[in-house]
Amino acid sequence: MEKRYYLAVDIGASSGRHIVGWMEDGRLCTEEVYRFPNGVQRQDGHLVWDIEGIFAHVKEGLKAAFARYPRIESVSIDTWAVDYVLLDAQDQPVYPVYAYRDGRTQDAVGAVHGIVPFAQLYARTGIQFQPFNTIYQLYADKLAGRLDGAEDFLMVPEYLLWRLCGVKAREYTNATSTGLVNARTGQYDPAILQALGLPQRLFPSLTGPGAVLGELLPDVAAEAGGQCRVVLCATHDTASAVEGIPMAEGEGLFLSSGTWSLLGAKLPQPLTSEESCRANFTNEGGVGYIRYLKNIMGLWIVQCIQKQLGISFGEMVDLARTSGCDRVFDVNDPRFTAPADMKAEIAAALSETGPAPAGDADLIRSVYRSLAESYGKAVREMEAVTGRSWDILYIAGGGAKNALLNDLTARATGKRVIALPIEATAIGNLKVQMKIEEE
């Protein structure tokens, strides 16, 4: 039987990768064919994305994939959530493309809640409060007049897919992260849009994962050296990651451990109770289920320290193993969102409740301990709110490779940890593409 090859483009806040997948002897095989760095840039006092630079890398990765696998059936793209590109009447981007860590929503949050209190938003959408949620970013755009000339709105992966094939689509799993989608209908909530005065033209119907958009545009195909279909995966990277974890609904908890740590469970229906709202859990769209989870700061802190120290992640773990430091701090404190000096910020936070870390080993171990404790707290909250309990915690993503953090997490959560050091997000992306082919 002839092998069929598929391409997953998985772009995170710190890097992007192109991974080709195919079935062989009943198992999914993958090969990374291209990788590129990604990250926010500072421009005029704001944090922004180089969206054109990202798209250039998408095309370079396509070229690398076709050079190795001349026949590729389809390609799809997943990225981080909440960020987007506004388009003007000529379908040109409205610059800058802001990054979610930018602080421009500070005034917008209070303004939005003054119109629609958060408790009402949560009851309708089931989405947890985060100051960078798309709803606040868009309202900041409204206050700044950026929506006046905007004729379209595409989340980042939707924009990149459109640039590949010329077809615009609004994908359900990523749209739920905006805080504007009704948890029951699975479509943008017209009552919220109207109350906030957001232009209805920007929010057409949503499409679920698995839709075929079209083929590569002729100029893109010529540049890439091949032709294939462009399809919608679960374009929110966490939605794809959960699809890539081999677990059935109700079987266990999942922890997608990357720049952000997303800890949760698959539920058949959204849970938007007052208790859930107070605990700040979120109901994001999955592929046929709800991803009931909590956002935790995650490996962002580790990544920042790694860059400051100039050592590998493995060397960081080795250093931490030499320390017996058990100091912890709140990894979700906003002070760690985008500090100029992460090491100094952590040392300052620890100094407020006790002695500062004696050296890098103590500081790194404190980070791992604090992450594990935050996972334990989230698990206990989730079990209390849902009235359910789980025995297993599946960990996938970059953090799954950190044996020390996994051990600390098992201790903090009381769960049997199953680490899956796999490209879960790319696997989930590929699974949706392959399912289209089967149908």
Image: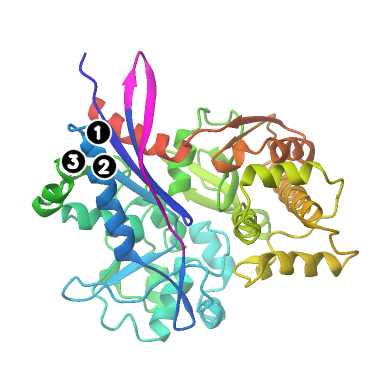
Identity of the residue furthest to the front in this view: 310
Label 3 is placed on what type of residue?
Arg
Expressed as whole percent of the image width and height from the top left, the position of residue 329 reads: 78, 59
* CA distance separating discs 1 and 2: 7 Å
Q: Nearer the viewer, mark 3 or mark 2?
A: 2
Image position of 316 with respect to 308: above or below: above
Q: Picture quarter containing residue 392? A: top right
Q: Earlier in the sequence, mark 3 or mark 2?
A: 2
Q: Which mark is residue 68?
A: 1
Is 426 above or below relative to 3? below
Q: Amino acid at mark 1?
A: Arg
Between circles 3 and 1, the one closer to the viewer is 1
* Lateral position of residue 212 relative to residue 426, left or right: left
- The vertical placement of 214 against 191, above or below, is above
In the image: residue 100, left or right of residue 19: right
**Looking at numbered disc 2 in the image, what kind of residue is underneath it?**
Ala
SS class, disc 3? strand
The residue tagged 2 is: 64
Camera-side residue of 283 and 28: 28
